[in-house]
Amino acid sequence: MGLNLQKKKTIIENMHKTANLALSAIIADSRGIIANKINYLRKKSRENGIIFNIVRNNLLKLAFKGTQFECLKKKLSGPILIAFSMEHPGSAARIFKKFSIENKGFKIIGAALKSKSLSSSKIDQLAAMPTYKESIILIINIMQEITLGKLLRTLIAIKEK
């Protein structure tokens, strides 16, 4: 059953609002992926603060007008999934990248960050980018190593004297 005009307008409005709030977006081709795996991807997306949708391309093109994701319009063809990262720019890319490794039929088509379309190598970099929490842990570990190193050098110097 098709969507009536009011439902289409609501979808466009909701997607436009989401696109204005999102940090990044990633689109993928879902051909050959069974529904259970898509549901698994939805669950993982919700857990990581990602808004995941399956929307008709024409509606998505209309929703992208005036947003930072207009650069993705050219890549919208065929059955696609779109994920908006709301908390961390790389979270959707990370989930899609991992899912594409596990499911060979799943193909990442493109991504956008700050009004720029990303190449596949840039998508890999975005997926590898650490979250805020991971960055803080990394900094703390580095500081601990530096402190321990100074302590060891001091103890060695005292021993030698």
Image (cartoon, rainbow, N blue to C red):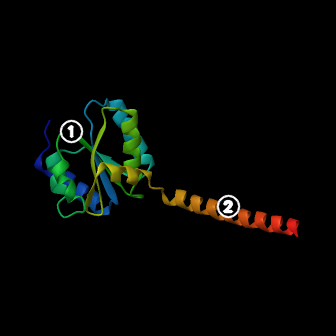
Report the residue marked by disc 1.
Answer: 79
Relative to 38, residue 118 above or below: below
Estimate the x, y position of residue 39 in percent, counting from the top left. 36, 36
Viewer-closest of 9 and 148: 148
Report how many numbered discs are placed on residues in the image.
Answer: 2
**Which residue is depicted at the point 73% across and 67% down?**
150
Estimate the x, y position of residue 158 in percent, counting from the top left. 86, 69
* Left or right, residue 156 beside residue 62: right
Density class for disc 2 (Cα within 10 Å; few <14, some 14-19, many ≥20) is few
Q: Quadrant of the N terminus?
A: top left
What's the residue type where badge 2 is placed? Glu
Callout 2: SS: helix
* Left or right, residue 12 beside residue 19: left
What's the residue type where badge 1 is placed? Pro
Q: Earlier in the sequence, mark 2 or mark 1?
A: 1
Question: What's the CA distance linking mark 2 and mark 1?
Answer: 49 Å
Residue 22: name its quadrant: bottom left
Q: Are marks 2 and 1 in contact (CB under 8 Å)?
A: no
Q: Quadrant of the C terminus?
A: bottom right
Report the residue marked by disc 2.
Answer: 145
**Which residue is depicted at the point 82% across and 68% down?**
157
**Which residue is depicted at the point 22% across and 63% down?**
67
**Which residue is depicted at the point 16% across and 43% down?**
77
